[in-house]
Image (cartoon, rainbow, N blue to C red):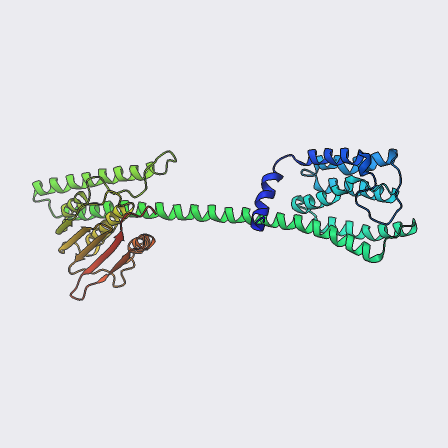
């Protein structure tokens, strides 16, 4: 049994090959075989007649246009139809009459413009054709004419169905490509948000602190050096991210730094934020994207702490389990949002973006205000996902 769902695929596979010409040659040669004379399609009820020169012309008109039916379907249908009418009016009933069904399927599948006008013109022409057969002595009944017309409509309908499936498949591919591009833009925007926001926030906080250290040159120098280091780190991270846009780059965007969370914590401490950091367990060798997402969770939580609770004690706890990574960040006395969706006045790509990342991996994410003041960020990220 042939799966009907594979018919459009099989049709496209063979339709892309120049197979109409061999079929035309086969029909032409078969029509000349004596054993097949008067054994082709019979329409109109005209008496059989021996072949003559017009028979060869009728055969050629039905077979030769098959070679160009892919490029000019309407022209091919017109020529084959004329050959078929000549064939039936003269009573040759050649084997080449099969070409009419083939060219109808092709026209339904290939014709793009003026489809309705073309079919209306051929349908209108069918009426005087049946009258002509009747006046010339044809014995076909009215039911026979109707059935033959319905058979022609069926052949064209099959071609139209194939065309519709081809168009639907092209539209589906276009939508998939567009959705993929939009998802990639969103991913890049999140990466840029994570990288830029954290480093720039640290630089802003350190620069603001430097304004009050004019009387303490040694501390001012250390603060400015920290700002310089943060700026260099931001440039380095941006370069890494932009390298990922290169199609030949093989790594995954949003990778976790090889030296882990400590540089991130130290950078936040240098910006004036007291951070207590705890990391337990050993990272799984096949953690997939869980590690990078955990890194982004800590980065975003520390960025919010710098923005909205500068100077308040902050704790970061990272637990590496066999099947998941758990991250908890707590900050005291924060003037942060109560919803945990995004930072006040932010772009909406912060905590909400992290929530989407964690959800994609099948984890849990929560953020909001603590009952005793401050805010928290908590994430459970399944390890081993390659999403």
In the rendered image, the residue lying farthest to the front is: 35
Q: Residue at x 37, y 33 (%)?
A: 248
**Seen in the image, is 271 located left or right of residue 44?**
left
- How many discs mark residues in the rendered view? 0
Q: Is residue 248 above or below residue 156?
A: above
Residue 76 x, y percent position in the rendering: 74, 40
**Who is closer to the viewer here, 126 or 237?**
126
- For residue 65, what is the image quadrant? top right
Q: Nearer the viewer, residue 268 or 118?
A: 118
Is residue 302 at all visible to an observer of this figure?
Answer: yes
Q: Which residue appears at 19% of the width and 52% of the height?
A: 306
Report x, y in % for residue 77.
Answer: 74, 42
The quadrant in which residue 334 appears is bottom left
Q: Is residue 211 visible?
A: no
Residue 324 x/y as whole percent: 24, 52
Residue at figure coordinates x 23%, y 57% from the top left: 378
| Residue under the point 10% across and 44% down | 214
Q: Is residue 143 left or right of residue 264?
A: right
Q: In terms of image quadrants, where is residue 72?
A: top right
In front here: 4 or 204? Answer: 4
Of residues 181 and 53, the one drawn nearer to the viewer in this rendering: 53
Q: Residue 10 location, x and y as percent?
A: 58, 43
């Amino acid at each position: 049994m042939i799966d009907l769902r594979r018919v459009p695929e099989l049709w496209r596979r063979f339709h892309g090959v120049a197979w109409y010409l061999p079929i035309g040659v086969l029909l032409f040669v078969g029509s000349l075989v004596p054993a097949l004379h008067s054994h082709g399609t019979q329409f109109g009820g005209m008496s059989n007649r021996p072949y003559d020169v017009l028979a060869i012309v009728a055969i050629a008109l039905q077979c030769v246009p098959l070679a160009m039916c892919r490029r000019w379907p309407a022209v091919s249908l017109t020529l084959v139809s004329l050959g078929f009418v000549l064939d039936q009016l003269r009573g040759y009933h050649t084997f080449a009459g099969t070409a009419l069904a083939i060219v109808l399927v092709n026209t339904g599948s290939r014709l793009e413009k003026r489809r309705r006008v073309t079919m209306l013109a051929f349908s209108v022409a069918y009426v005087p054709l049946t009258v002509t057969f009747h006046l010339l002595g044809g014995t076909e009944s009215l039911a026979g004419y109707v059935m033959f017309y319905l058979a022609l409509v069926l052949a064209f309908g099959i071609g139209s169905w194939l065309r519709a499936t081809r168009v639907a498949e092209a539209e589906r591919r276009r939508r998939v490509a567009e959705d993929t591009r939009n998802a990639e833009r969103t991913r890049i925007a999140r990466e840029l948000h994570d990288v830029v926001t954290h480093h720039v926030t640290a630089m802003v906080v350190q620069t603001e602190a430097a304004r009050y250290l004019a009387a303490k040159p040694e501390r001012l120098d250390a603060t400015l050096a920290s700002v310089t280091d943060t700026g260099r780190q931001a440039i380095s991270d941006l370069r890494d991210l932009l390298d990922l846009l290169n199609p030949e780059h093989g790594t995954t965007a949003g990778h976790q730094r090889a030296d882990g969370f400590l540089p991130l914590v130290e950078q936040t401490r240098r910006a004036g934020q007291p951070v207590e950091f705890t990391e337990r367990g050993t990272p799984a060798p096949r953690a997939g994207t869980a590690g990078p997402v955990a890194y982004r969770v800590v980065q975003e939580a520390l960025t919010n702490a710098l923005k909205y609770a500068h100077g308040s004690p902050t704790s970061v706890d990272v637990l590496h389990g066999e099947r998941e990574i758990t991250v908890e960040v707590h900050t005291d006395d924060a003037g942060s949002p109560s919803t945990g969706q995004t930072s006040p006045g932010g772009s909406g790509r912060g905590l909400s973006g992290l929530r989407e990342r964690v959800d994609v991996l099948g984890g849990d994410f929560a953020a909001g205000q603590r009952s005793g003041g401050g805010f928290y960020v908590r994430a459970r990220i399944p390890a081993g996902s390659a999403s």
